[in-house]
Amino acid sequence: MGAIVFDNYVFDSWLNKKSDEILSKVDKSTISTEEMLTLILKAQTNHFHHMDVEFREEFKRIELRFEKVDDRFKSIDLKMDDRFEAMNSKIDDRFKWLMGIMITLSAGIYLKLFLG
């Protein structure tokens, strides 16, 4: 009649037996305040169990959402790495051209100034 709550099998067994006894006599006679409190305790432990199950499921859904977000960031990171590599290769090509032009100009100025 419910799940184990708080990992206490002795308590759960006692509470199940006691609540079954009380429920069997509810229609036949009145129940005492102590018996009513036992039923309330049983209802609360059932509620705790159901809330625990719901929260665990919700945490799993949240974890899956975070995994999806992580995957999106990883894919964006890879795309950005590819873009930076492409930019670096373009910059390297431009730098090589610039260095070639600078060397050619320097050689031309040297030849003009010193050779005449």
Image (cartoon, rainbow, N blue to C red):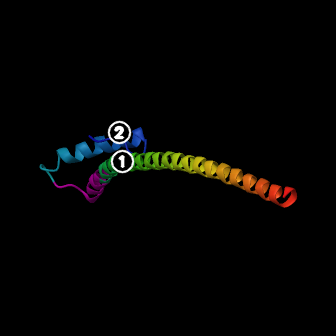
Q: Nearer the viewer, residue 107 or 54?
A: 107
**60 left or right, relative to 29:** right
Query: To which residue does mark 2 refer?
Result: 13
Please name the residue shown 33% across and 45% down the image.
15
Where residue 83 appears, as percent x and y from the top left, is 52, 49
The amino acid at mark 2 is Ser
The quarter in which the N terminus is drawn is top left
**36 left or right, relative to 78:** left
Magenta range: 30-43
Neighbours of disc 1 within 10 Å: few (<14), some (14-19), many (20+): few
Where residue 97 appears, as percent x and y from the top left, is 65, 50
Residue 111 located within the stretch drawn in magenta: no
The reply to whether dot 2 and dot 1 touch (C-beta < 8 Å) is: no
**102 left or right, relative to 78:** right
Please name the residue shown 32% across and 49% down the image.
54
Query: To which residue does mark 1 refer?
Result: 61
Element type at marker 2?
helix
Most extreme residue toward the front is 116
Give residue 50's mark. Answer: none
The amino acid at mark 1 is Arg
Where residue 43 appears, as percent x and y from the top left, is 28, 52
Q: Nearer the viewer, residue 63 or 3?
A: 63
Q: Is residue 40 above or below residue 22?
A: below
Q: Is residue 58 above or below residue 10?
A: below
The quarter in which the C terminus is drawn is bottom right
Neighbours of disc 2 within 10 Å: few (<14), some (14-19), many (20+): few
Magenta stretch prevailing secondary structure? helix
Please name the residue shown 39% across and 45% down the image.
64
Where residue 48 appears, as percent x and y from the top left, is 34, 51
